[in-house]
Image (cartoon, rainbow, N blue to C red):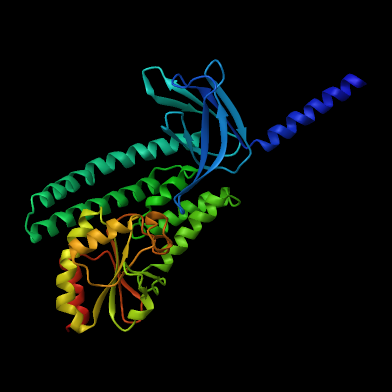
Amino acid sequence: MQQSLILGLTFLALFATSAQAAFTISGTLASESPGGVLKLQRENLDKRSQTLEGKLTIATDQTFQESFGGQAGLFTLILSDQSKISLAIQDGQVIEIESDPQNANDYNINGSRDTETLQVYEQFRKESLARLVYPPRAILRKAKTENRDSETLEKLAQDEVDGYSAHLKELNDFVIDQLEPNVALYATSLRWDPDHRIAELSQVLQSFTDANPELDITQRMQEKLERFRATAIGSRAPALQGVDLDGTPHTLEQYRGKVILVDFWASWCTPCRVENQFYKELIETYSKHGFDLFAVNMDTSVSSWKRASQRDQITWPQISDSMAWKSPFASAYNVTALPANFLLDEQGKILARNLRGKQLEAKLNELLTN
């Protein structure tokens, strides 16, 4: 009787432990020393932030194992040398991480279909970047250091922007056509293109939502689509309010009654710096017809913002909260890459997105001089 009771209590204890453990991470890493500690961080892509989910201690035989009770989501496992392993984890998974025998700096991960999907996506994303974005970026930077003429720089800047646009479209295509709609979908949301096959992308998200309605990441992805709708052509542009380099407050509402270009830029963004020179010409030509610029700087350093503004001779109103990608300004407008701009009519409705160079000038000519 007593033995049966002990067995029953043991079973209940094991059941309670397994019920609380949403997923388990274990493995062996040759690079880790006994007693070392790995950190598991949960990723919040919308806030560009991480929270500590828990720690894993390396045993004497260089193994580790720990169970976690949190929701499914996107995680980063930080090793003792600060290198990182990205993981997309669904409830109930038992993930095993082993050092690659052929490469001590690489890892084999088993037990998580979601992580496998994430790895396939990341491999494609990096290949696409290397093919479409890095070559024109290198050419532009070289031309800028050589002080090439403004017309050449504008063309090369447009080449880089076009390359990045093609890159984002490829990523949307990959998600829609090839990606299994599991937890890895959240990782892709950082680079969704709102102008390319968005209805089909919404269907992919709906499939994930139907299977995972309770997850925080589901809500975040749905909210991202809602922000896409809020910045769609014809929508009223989200409010913007902040201070400039002198501490003077500016609001987007102040400039109602004009055609406004809301421009997101940063000192480190070469195409942005090229466009600033072009914007000076636009202001000179079209300000008398009711055109103005309202810039949002995305630097984290006020000194970098100030130095770039002085060098580019920016005279139009601009604001910044020095939070870069964590800025509510970027979140409200779904800005995840630079340069980015939004052309607004006199009532504050969005007329176009990401018009540049001759296309932007032609649009202003059509709106303001005909």
Question: In the picture shown, does residue 290 fall above or below 16?
Answer: below
- Tell me where residue 74 appears, x and y as whole percent: 49, 42
- Residue located at (8% from left, 50% from top): 146
Which quadrant, please, contains the N terminus? top right
Is residue 111 visible to the viewer in this orientation of the structure? no
Which quadrant, please, contains the C terminus? bottom left
Residue 39 relative to residue 243: left or right: right
- Tell me where residue 123 appears, x and y as whole percent: 34, 36
Residue 25's image quarter?
top right
Report the label total: 0
Spot the residue most to the left. 149
- Tell me where residue 111 appears, x and y as whole percent: 53, 29
Is residue 211 visible to the viewer in this orientation of the structure? yes
- Residue located at (46% from left, 30% from top): 79
- Residue located at (22% from left, 44% from top): 134
Residue 198 relative to residue 53: left or right: left
Spot the residue most to the right. 1
Residue 18 relative to residue 139: left or right: right
- Tell me where residue 312 appears, x and y as whole percent: 18, 63
- Residue located at (47% from left, 49% from top): 49
